[in-house]
Structure formats: structure tokens, C-alpha cells
Amino acid sequence: MAPVAMAVRALLLLAAVGPAAALWPQPQLQRSPPAAARCPLPPARFRFAHAAGSAVGPGCAVLDEAFQRYRALIFAAARPADKLNISRDPLLLYADTVWGALRGLETFSQLVGRDENGMYYVNETEIVDFPRFPHRGLLLDTSRHYLPLKAILETLDVMAYNKLNVFHWHIVDDPSFPYESFTFPELSRQGAFNPMTHVYTASDVQTVIEYARLRGIRVIAEFDTPGHTLSWGPGAPGLLTLCYLGKDPSGTYGPINPIFNTTYQFVTSLFQEISSVFPDYFIHLGGDEVDFTCWKSNPEILAFMKKMGFGEDYTKLESFYIQRLLDIVSSLGKGYMVWQEVFDNGVKVKPDTIIHVWKNNVPYAEEMANVTKAGYRALLSAPWYLNRISYGQDWMAAYQVEPLKFKGSSKQKDLVIGGEACMWGEYVDVTNLTPRLWPRAGAVAERLWSNATVRNLQDAYVRLADFRCELLRRGVQAEPLFVGYCDHEFGGF
Amino acid sequence: MAPVAMAVRALLLLAAVGPAAALWPQPQLQRSPPAAARCPLPPARFRFAHAAGSAVGPGCAVLDEAFQRYRALIFAAARPADKLNISRDPLLLYADTVWGALRGLETFSQLVGRDENGMYYVNETEIVDFPRFPHRGLLLDTSRHYLPLKAILETLDVMAYNKLNVFHWHIVDDPSFPYESFTFPELSRQGAFNPMTHVYTASDVQTVIEYARLRGIRVIAEFDTPGHTLSWGPGAPGLLTLCYLGKDPSGTYGPINPIFNTTYQFVTSLFQEISSVFPDYFIHLGGDEVDFTCWKSNPEILAFMKKMGFGEDYTKLESFYIQRLLDIVSSLGKGYMVWQEVFDNGVKVKPDTIIHVWKNNVPYAEEMANVTKAGYRALLSAPWYLNRISYGQDWMAAYQVEPLKFKGSSKQKDLVIGGEACMWGEYVDVTNLTPRLWPRAGAVAERLWSNATVRNLQDAYVRLADFRCELLRRGVQAEPLFVGYCDHEFGGF
């Protein structure tokens, strides 16, 4: 019986064999004939295979492993195929890239239904699909609370179900430094919550990167400086600014000290390591929320400000640091993303820099307009801080965002590469991460994948509630949208 | 080595053998000598035993099973005692009742620490303790979402850790009727989300009651009428009011129809069953949020209103129903709790009725004053709807509530029997119940247990964060209060 033949050539086109299945995110085109045939899919006779003429065949780990994963997801505990039996009318999936084929497999898995007798089937459907934005990300914060490797891997699975393709790993910050650096092992030894249990070893990091790659997800690591670095201090003596109370050091520390050459030697070595560990072209360099209080208290910094002619404008000192950091990272052959302050402060950045718009104290649409007018690429997160929760169906607000709703030319709009849902960790750890993320982050995923015209809240509710039940069936602890139940509840009762 | 000897006689007094351990909820008195001795507790030589002269000995299931539970909680996987070895100075726990002894065991378990070498110990401490309010409840809603038995039992465990003693089981409501009635089996067959999987069988209910009893928790079932009964309709034809659109039935249903004798026959039979199934003296009869729209549309009800001389005052019709219901339940030898509308509408209730204050549109302190002025016992929930979430540390608002802060005599204050944290189920099911409940409901637990003077937020933060780590150690998926980590994280990494 009908295996899904697969040819990796053109755009996603899934010709499956009723009524339209509910899909999340909504494809660009989904069409079923008026009298669509229902095609049974007996597990024992089903297999995925590469179509004749496919540019990719067996041996491509991304697809080979995806075939196994999706077979298990679709048929749960059903018996696998034991022999090849290609029907005359295989279900076809065409894709330009293996990544497109991966997305198509996810769509196919959502098309498969199960009738009252337990028989699997797909209804005849034609789907043409492609993402609206190329950058569809999710930020996890592993510094405010440590997230175990397993939680990160599970999140990557659910990202793939949502067709999200960028894992923004906000790996270190003020509270803890869980990244085990081989160049500076003292950073995590002194800076992790627990240097034995609450760290990411080199092997953990490799596991995350490869697990993500096999699911079509890029990993962009963020090492935020010069602020948000308090946890770096104990393992890197002399790196942070010593704060003063009057004429004496107060015993507390501020942002990275930007006036010493040793600082830039340290930064160069660290980012050399980061550049080689994380294969993605982009590194997120942070640059947000630099508090000047400590810098202002330090006499050496005051002298430096004077010498450099910065007056009392500490954004100039901040820019001085960031500029050197960007040059260092550029020289390592990497591109970079930065939080919007770097742009707001007028730091000179490379033309291919991605400006990450996050602030909510001014309308983010204005910032999107400004960033793109200046010719930079913009990434939107301001309305998608999903760590912020409120009572009721707050996924709707995230869903109703329109990233391109700002004043600007079509050339400006083209500079919007997408967005990221952010799950900051002040109040989130492994105990509540999954129900807080899913299905709420699905709202962002559909906004970034589907056509701009896909905005109907009632329709989205029905599909998202259905998709959430599918997440439960796949073992994901996703919270309910509203009153009701699923055929397969979490925990399998 | 020192077993905890136990005499069930006086108030809780735990004389254990440093610095004061962080306890939740805070005991009425906790004292350690300036140079408190540290007493090691080697698991293999530790056992609980009844003290000579105790009114209760082996054979009391509540204590026998509690000894086993707390031994396992305290020592985790450590080897049990294999021989009796009573020291000359046993740790003593005195209690007036077995229930008090149970609370003392919980306190003792929180006193036990573990040093760097893995050795268990307690520091010399004297504790005198008793609850401020006798009714310390938690409401779970199993109608808007079904909660599997396991989730209810786990919640009972964590209630006991918090010294909460009343499980208010809001078992049925509009969306579903999961209670399997032996008198009216069609109610769940037609009214449950799924009559096979999403129901509480008689055995399930007995399991909940006994599990709760062994933990010192009463189970008060709520069968809310005449509103909140839409799910009763399909399994009880003729019970609900048929709504009209002009002259014709609209096909939709409203509250229970209060004008037919058959209604009261049904109600009598159902509450006969409920009275025998749930052994607690109290039943919660609901009585909240009765929508009059449907009653107003129904010509038979209009005729009845006229006949009874109710004019256009539908609260009189509501009261007519409630009065008969209360009389029925009284005749079954049961006491009842009702939501505040029953009192607000002037229904005549028995003197021992508990009025449950929940509304937030008017200051709840006024309602507490009014209820107690009328001589009724009051139970507070209005500020403790924990299903309502907001960003940040919202446990603090719950913690800062003072139930007795209303204008009234000391006699009135004496009528406040306590309160209940409520976790309504619109947005909560098994996927997010535990992290949403804990440790937030702990704030309510301490308010209801500890002295009124125990209100320091900083102190509470430290103890509650510590208690939450202990909950993780016990396997409870309790969410974090803020940035940080625990030695034993959830999932054991």
C-alpha cells in the first residue's frame, strides 16, 4: 500500500489521498476535491521512500532519521513495514531542499487520521507550502534557571512540529554560567549554579546542535555582553568592572570593564571558541540593558572617559566596547545578531547584521521602521515575550501580531526576516517550561509560517486546539486552550 | 539511635535535637537553644514508635501508614531500620489527636536535614503548633477538564505537606459530569467527556476519600445546582429548563427546572446517594451564578411565577428551589456549604450553614462582615482564585490576605472557619495543574495555619523557596518562585 514517495526537487507539494484535515501552522494552499477519496494507511504496509529521480536518496541522515521519527509519531505502537510494496499511486512530496521535505513530513503526519476502528488513513489533499519568513525562532534562557538537556531536546522536537527553525540559546547571563568552556573552564566552575549538575558539557552542546540539525533547526548561541555578565566574574578575575562607593571599591561588580586590553584578549579567545563550537554563521552578541551606574562609580573608567573625550555619554563607552567586539567576531568569519540597543546607540555594525527588536516601552513598529530604513535586517520579539503570562487565552494577542505592520517601503518589509518567541527564565524552569510554551508558542509559529491573510481567530482556535491534542498524543505536556478534552490526554489515561 | 517516640495526648510539641530549620507553614512556636545540638539520624537505626502511655498504639492505620510514608519521604532510598534500638532520649511528639500527630510528622520531616557527607540529622528544636483556622481547603474542578485519579491523589499528598485539610471536590458542572452515579448511571454516560475514560467510578471516589483520610484531609463534594448543571441534561431528561425563543423551544437548556415535583424527586434520590458516598458531614450545594434568562423565556415558569406571587423577582424562584434542596439535604442528616449568593438572596438556611465567600466585584471584607453579623460561619475564597494567574510572584498577594480584616465583633471573627484556595479548570488540566498550584497554594496554606503575625514577605520568600525545593525532592512538579536552583531538581538531574 501507498508509501510516501519523496522527491527532493520543487516546492513542498503534498498530494495525499474527504474533508480537509486541521493543520498547524496553516499551509499556503490546502485543497481537497469535493468528493475526496479516503486512503487507508495500514502500518504494516506503509513506508517512506525516495521517489525515482530524487536528488537525495538513502544515506541522507536528515531524511533517513526523519522517516523513522515520523513513522513512530504517526503510527504510535503499530507494527512497522516488513516489506516494500509500492502502490501505483504513491503519495508524493516534492521539496526544493531536505529541510523543505522535513516540513512536508510534519504536514503529512498531521494529515493522517484514525477512524473508529483504529484504521489509519489520509484524505485526498493537495498542499503547496512554504514559509512566509525565513527566521522562525524560539529563545530559551538557561541562565536564570538551568534547563536539563532533555528539556531542550524535547523543546526542539516540538519546535519542529510547529515548523520553527531557529533555537536561540540564551545560554549564560547574570545568574549563572552553565556553558562549559574548554578555553576558560573556570567560568562554569565558578559561575554555574552547580558545576557538576547544572552545566552543559561540550558533548551536551554537540548533542543539542545535532538534534536540532536533524530537525531542520539552526542553533544560535547568545553570549550577551557587556551587561548581563555577573556570573562571568568569579571565573574571569579582572573582567568585570569593580564598582565604587565613594573612594573605595564596594565589593560589587558591574558590566564587563571595557577599558583594558586584557578584556579584549579574553573576549577574542572566548568568541574564537564559541565560533568553532556553534556552526551557525550567526552569533547573538546581546548588547542590551547596560547599566551605567557601576561604570560611573569607577575612577579608572572616569579617567578613560576623559582621555577618550566621551564627556559624560556612557553610551559612547558602551559603543566603544561593542564596536571592538563586533570587529573581533567579524574577523572570526561570523555574522552577528544584536539586541536593538546596539542599533539605537548608533554603533557601526556590518551591513548583514540582524537587529533584534524587543523593547516594549516604545511601539515596536517604530523600531521596525527605523531599523529597516537604516537598511538592516530586523527580527521581531517585542510582542512575543511568552514568559509574560496573563489569565485566559493570551495566545490570541501573540497570534494577532502582524510583523510587517509598520510604515515603510516594500524594500524595508523585505528586510524583516522573521521573529522569535522568547521564554525568559525568571519564573520558568523544567517544572513549567513545556505547559507555558505550548501551545502558546504555536501562535507565533503560525504567524511566522503562514500567509499574512491567515488571521481568523475562531479558525485558529479550532486548529490550535486540535494540534494541542496531537501534541498530547505525541507525549508533549502542552496546556489546554480552554474547557474540553482530548481523545489522548497527557499521561495516557 | 533516637526513634521518634510518639504520644497522642497534648498539643503538637516536637522536641527534636542548631540553627532553626525553615518550615512551611511556620509553626506557632519554634525555638532552638543558642547552642543547639545536632542529632544524627542514621536511617538504619531510626524508627517511629508510639511512646509509652500513648492513647494510640500500633493498629491505627492513619499513623501506621504515616510512619511508612514519612520514613520514605525523609530518607528517600536509604535502608530501613532492621532492629529496634530505642535511645534514652527519643525525639518526642505529643498530639491531642491522630490528625495532630500527622501534622507533627510533616513538621518533623521538614526538620530533617542532610549534611555534606549525606548524613541525616535534626537540630535540637522545640515546636508548639496548632492551626489558626480549622478549615484549610483546596478546590479542584474536575468538570471543565477531567483530572485523572493520579493527579487528585498527588494533590492530596501535597495538600498534606502544606497542612491543608479539606479537599473541596467541585466534581461536576456545565461542561461535563464525570461522577458515576449508581442511582442515575445515565448522568455520566451521557454527560462525561468520555464515559469510559473521563469518569470517576465508585471505586475511584472511595480511593480518593480513603487516601485523603489517611492524610488527615476531609473530602467535601460539591454538586452545584440549580445553575452549572448543563452536563446533567442529557442523562436526566426533563430536569433542566427548556429555553424558549419567542413561542417555541429554542433547543437549548437552562438551569434545573424548579417548578416540577419530578425535579425534587430526582434531587432527593441523587443527594441520598451523595450523602452515603461522601462521609463528611458537609456537602457543598453550590447555588452560585444562576442565569435567569432561560427561566424568563419559559411560559410554564412564567405561569408558576404568577401562581406563586413572585412577581418578576427570579431570585424568589431561585430561593424556592434552594430552600427545598436545603430541606432535603437536612433531612438526610447532612450539613451544607453554599456559595454566597444563597445568603445574599436571603434564603433561609440552617444555623450551622457555611457561607462560601467568593465574589470579587464587591469587597469581600464586607461580605465577611455581613455573613458573620447574620450569625453564619464564613469561609473565604474570594482573594484565593489561584486559577487566575499574572506575571511575577503572584503568591505574594495571596499571602498578604488577612481573613479577619473586616469590621465586626470578636464573636463575628470567631465565625470565620478558614478559607479555600480555588483552582478552577477553564485553563487547567493535568498538564499544568501541579506547577500552577504549587507552591502558590502554599501561600494560602500558611495564611490559614500560621499565626496572624506571620506576615513577613522576605522571610516567607526564603522559607517558601526552601519548601518548594523540598517539594521537588519529593517528586512534586512545583514551579519556581524566582531565579535560582535547587539541590534536587525536578526529574532528578
Image (spheres, coloured by chain):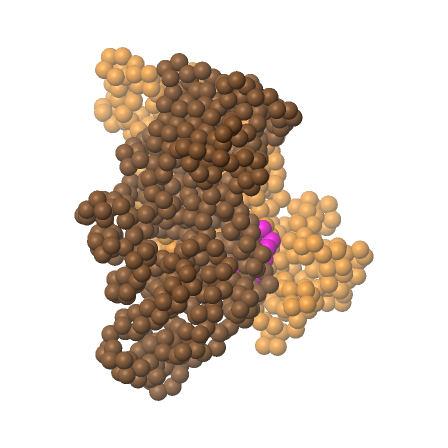
Chain colours: A orange, B brown
> Which of B65/A277 is in front?
B65
Residue lying furthest right: A83
The part of the image, by quadrant, that contains residue B123 is: top left
Q: Find residue A70 and report its horizontal and vertical position in percent.
A: 65, 53
Q: Main secondary structure of the magenta part?
A: loop
Residue lying furthest bottom: B247
Q: Quadrant of the C terminus of chain A?
A: bottom right
Q: Residue at x 58, y 71 (%)?
A: A19
Residue stretch in magenta: A485-493
Q: How many marks?
A: 0
Q: Find residue A199 and report its horizontal and vertical position in percent.
A: 53, 28
Q: Is residue B206 left or right of residue A266?
A: right
Q: Is residue A126 left or right of residue B159?
A: right
Q: Residue at x 57, y 33 (%)?
A: B72
Q: Residue at x 40, y 78 (%)?
A: B261
Asked if the magenta segment contains residue A486, the reply would be yes
Q: Residue at x 34, y 76 (%)?
A: B294
Asked if the magenta segment contains residue A427, the reply would be no
Q: Quadrant of the N terminus of chain A?
A: bottom right
Examine the rendered structure and indicate whether residue B318 appears above or below residue B415. Answer: below
Q: Find residue B410 and report its horizontal and vertical position in percent.
A: 21, 44
> Which of A311/A171 is in front?
A171
> Which of A121/B331 is in front?
B331
> Which of A202/B224 is in front?
B224
Residue A117 showing in the rendered view: yes
Q: Find residue A438 and report its horizontal and vertical position in percent.
A: 49, 50
Residue B107 showing in the rendered view: no
